[in-house]
């Protein structure tokens, strides 16, 4: 078997091709698995009324997997606010300081960029 990375229209795919004897064509179509889907542009979410000044930002590009905190909930430094999924790993995004959740600026399933605003605290 041989592994290749092929890029089509900006999307990278890992492709595995199996050989069946010397010079023979592959017995089946190559298995194609998307390496990483391109991140969609983040939604321009308007902050909720009374949005806080402390930003909770994504540490990596990914997809919002779960909202761990609710607007109005008190959180301590290090408490999870949002969980994102990146490279098949769930990554909790934690509160940078003690506070109260002022806004949640994403929804489950939204794509996010590294440094993108996920929530605010006050």
Image (tube, rainbow, N blue to C red):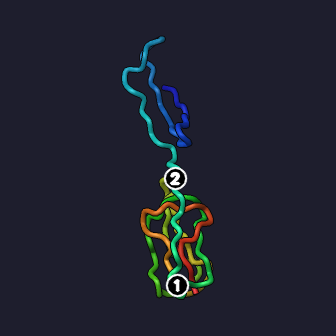
Mark 1 falls on what kind of element?
Answer: strand
Of tags 2 and 1, the one toward the viewer is 1
Q: Which residue in the structure is indicated by mark 1?
A: 102
Q: Position of residue 35 (x, y in %)?
A: 51, 43
2 or 1: tag closer to the N-terminus: 2
Q: Residue at x 51, y 66 (%)?
A: 43
Instruction: Give above or below for 29 relative to 84.
Output: above
Instruction: Give above or below for 18 relative to 68.
Output: above
Q: Position of residue 8 (x, y in %)?
A: 52, 37
Instruction: Give above or below for 79 relative to 116.
Output: below
Which quadrant of the figure contains the C terminus? bottom right
Mark seen at residue 87:
2
Crowding at dot 2, Cα within 10 Å, few <14 / some 14-19 / many 20+, comes out as few
Q: Position of residue 75 (x, y in %)?
A: 52, 84
Q: Residue at x 44, y 64 (%)?
A: 65
Instruction: Give above or below for 27 relative to 111.
Output: above
Q: Residue at x 58, y 84 (%)?
A: 52
Toward the viewer: 44 or 77? 44
Q: CA distance from mark 2 to mark 1?
A: 29 Å
Mark seen at residue 61:
none
Q: Position of residue 101 (x, y in %)?
A: 52, 83
Mark 2 falls on what kind of element?
Answer: loop
Residue found at the very far left of the displayed protein: 28
């Amino acid at each position: 078997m041989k592994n290749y990375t092929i890029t089509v229209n900006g999307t990278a795919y890992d492709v595995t091709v199996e050989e069946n004897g010397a010079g023979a064509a592959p017995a089946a179509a190559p298995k194609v698995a998307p390496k990483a889907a391109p991140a969609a542009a983040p939604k321009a979410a308007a902050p909720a009324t009374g949005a806080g000044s402390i930003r909770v930002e994504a540490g990596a590009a990914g997809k919002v997997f779960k909202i761990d905190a609710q607007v109005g909930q008190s959180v301590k430094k290090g408490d999870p606010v949002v969980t994102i999924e990146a490279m098949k790993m769930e990554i909790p995004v934690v509160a940078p300081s003690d506070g109260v959740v002022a806004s949640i600026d994403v929804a489950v399933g939204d794509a996010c960029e590294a440094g993108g605003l996920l929530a605010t605290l006050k």
